[in-house]
Structure formats: structure tokens, C-alpha cells
Amino acid sequence: MDAYEAILTRRSTRKYKADPVAPEILQKVVEAGRYAPSGGNNQTNHFLVVQSPDVAEKLVGLAEAAFAKMEADENTYPSLRNSILASKKGGYVFTYRAPVLIVVANRKDYGNNMADAVAAVENMMIAANALDLGSCYINQLYWLNEEPSLLAALRNLGLKEDERVYASMALGYAATGDGLPSRKPLERKGNEVTFL
Amino acid sequence: MDAYEAILTRRSTRKYKADPVAPEILQKVVEAGRYAPSGGNNQTNHFLVVQSPDVAEKLVGLAEAAFAKMEADENTYPSLRNSILASKKGGYVFTYRAPVLIVVANRKDYGNNMADAVAAVENMMIAANALDLGSCYINQLYWLNEEPSLLAALRNLGLKEDERVYASMALGYAATGDGLPSRKPLERKGNEVTFL
């Protein structure tokens, strides 16, 4: 797919087929993330590519339990507030049950950790779209990146002591008739531009 | 250019020709940024597209003066330290004198400000590469996003009271023989991947 088309037709997919993503396709998506720029070319992103349903389920349960203990009021960031309220009700699944969850961690004491992780996720979402895969940016593990239960679980999976999660994404085939992500025109609300 | 190729061959360009970027090309690059995902589809990025050499020169001078007043030691983030030390010496130009500087601001009190701005810049850098333009991620205005002199100057240019800069980039034709960005293989140092 043409680069410009892949950028303009990328949309957030929130419903996925159970079909797995073939290893060579998944490798291609992750490779796109590894080619994102990094501060001083440090390349310290650490990609945890979760395909195991058991591992994903464990993270989903820990996140729900952690959110359920948090409080939200009208000053809470709306998406975080939704996660908290949905978790208190029960049955909250932050991964949309996508077959793949890609978690991007980086060093806690590194000034460009957040920017490097986000740039990698954006690259992976564009590559996913070009490969007819759906994806969705996921904030929940970033919001909970100091939560002890999740830190312990992620360390069990390979997260290093000095690393924290800064961005993540769901990935898989969209649960639409043709298995393609929605590529309807984007509803334009803002994103103001000032030319100088 | 193919999407995957555009992602894998994007490199940081730090030397630019003086040639301006045609308005329709610049519009295309900014449009790529506007199509980046945003938290809750808020679309609150504000793109300040600086083409005027006078405006760029003003920002360069203010940034140099601000960095020159700061102190750096061995605990300072290395790139920031470089900016401080170079500014104390004098003649520090954070824009690489690229013909275009794109500044992405967002609301200070919005939880996804940084992620939304970085995703937009990444989209614009990939689009730029597909259009044979060079680009480079620029952190300096983010580091100085509470500096009063720069806030005042940016507000003069259209930045709103509640907005701050979270990411920016240089854009233009690379000062190489063929005017193309360097697309040499990336030197691989890190970016570890753990499949689970």
C-alpha cells in the first residue's frame, strides 16, 4: 500500500477476529516499530509481543483489579475515568481481546522514553494498516506503569528492573465482513493548523 | 512510495538545502500529521508551520538564550546537555536551518498531549520521506515549553493560553548531491524484542 494512503486510512479497530497473526507478518509489524527514530539514536525501546491468550488474560485481570481500586471524578482524564468506572462494574477488557498486544517499554530514567515508544507504536499501526491488519492505541498499561501487581507480572515476562511501559497497541484482523479495518473518512473535529 | 519502505528508510536529516517546500507538498505533510490517532479522537493538536526565516530566527535566538542560562551536569539528559553547552558557547541553531519547522502544541491539561503530538510528528516524518523530503525530530521547544520568552513569542504566533509545545520537527530537502534523505541501512544497536 502507498505510504500516504496507509497514513490517511489508518483507523482504530476495537473488534477483532480470533485469527492469529502469522509470525512473518507480526515480525514485519514489529520491525516497523524498531525503525522509529529515538532520542540520540538510543534504540532503547523494549517490545513485549503478547500472543499467548493466558498472558493477555492475566494482564487484563490485573489491570481491571488495579483500576477498580482507583477513584475517578470530573477532573479525571475521561478515558482513564471510563477504565476506572468500567472496572468497578466488572468485566473490563482493555485489550479488546485482540490476538496480539504489543507493549513498548523503555528506561524509566531516560528523557525520551515516552516519545520513542509512541513513535514506534505509530510506525507499527501504519505498517499494520498497509498489511490489512487492524490496530488500536492502548493507554491502560502506561497509566498503570507503576502499579506493583502489573510491574511484577511484566517483569516475569521479561521487563527489566529499570523499564516501564510507555505505550502499547492491540493488533489483529478486524471483525468486519471482509476482515479489513474500517477506512471510512475521518470525522474532522479539530487539529488546527497555523501557517507562518 | 510503498508504506513499509517509507517507514524503514526514514532517517534523520540534519543538513538542508535553502529550497522552500512548495505549499501543496507542505499541505500534504501536515495533513498526514492531522490523521494521526488522538486520545478519545480529541484531535486537539495545534500545528504551527513556520516557513518564515524571520520567525524561525527569532525562536532560534530565544532558545539559545534560554539554554545558555541553564546548567548541565552528568545527570542531565545528554541531548539537553549538548543544547545547554552549545548555547553557552554561542551560535546554537536548534532548527538545523531547515526551511520549515513544524511545531505541534496541545492542551497543557490534557492527558494525551504528548502521545498525540509525537504520533502526528511520526506520521509527518514518514510522509516526508515518501515525498523525498528530509526531516528530523526536534525536542528543544518541548524542553523549553514553560520558558516565558518562548511562550510569549509562540503566543504571538497563535499558540493559545492553555497550549504548550510537545513535539516538533525540521523539514526540507536534504543537502546531499541528489537532494534525497540518507537512506543507508540503520545501524542497529538495541530495540530488544520479546515474543510471548
Image: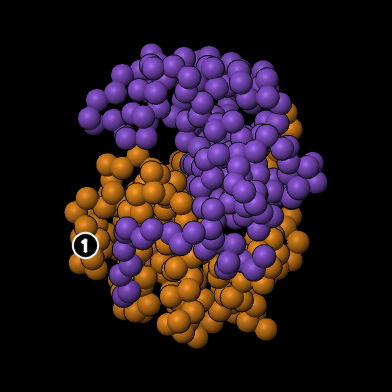
Chain colours: A purple, B orange
Q: Residue at x 28, y 45 (%)?
A: B108
Which residue sits furthest right?
A24
Residue A113 in the image: state x and y as whole percent: 52, 40
Of residues A89 and B195, the one nearer the viewer is: A89
The N terminus of chain A appears in which quarter of the rendering? Answer: bottom right
- The residue most toward the front is A177
Identified at 28% across, 30% down, the residue is: A76
For mark 1, what is the residue?
B155
Q: Is residue B162 above or below residue B6?
A: above
List x then y, in percent, for residue A133: 65, 49
Q: Residues within 10 Å of mark 1 (few under 14, many from 20)?
A: some
What is the chain identity of the residue bearing mark 1? B
Q: Is residue B37 visible?
A: yes
- Vertical placement of B1 versus A151: above or below? below
| Residue A85: quarter of image | top left
From the viewer's side, name the closer residue of A12 and B15.
Answer: A12
User: Left or right of A10: which side holds B11?
Assistant: right
The residue lying at 50 percent from left, 86 percent from top is B19
Residue A86 locus on image (x, y percent): 39, 23
Q: Residue at x 74, y 66 (%)?
A: B184
Q: Is residue B165 visible?
A: no
Which quarter of the figure has residue B179?
A: bottom right
Kind of residue sitting beneath label 1: Arg
Would residue B31 appear left or right of A78 to someone viewing this image?
right
Mark 1: which secondary structure?
Answer: helix
Using the image as rendered, state which of residue B182 and residue A57 is in the foreground. Answer: A57
In the picture, the quarter occupied by the C terminus of chain A is bottom left
Q: Residue A32: x and y, percent?
A: 67, 52
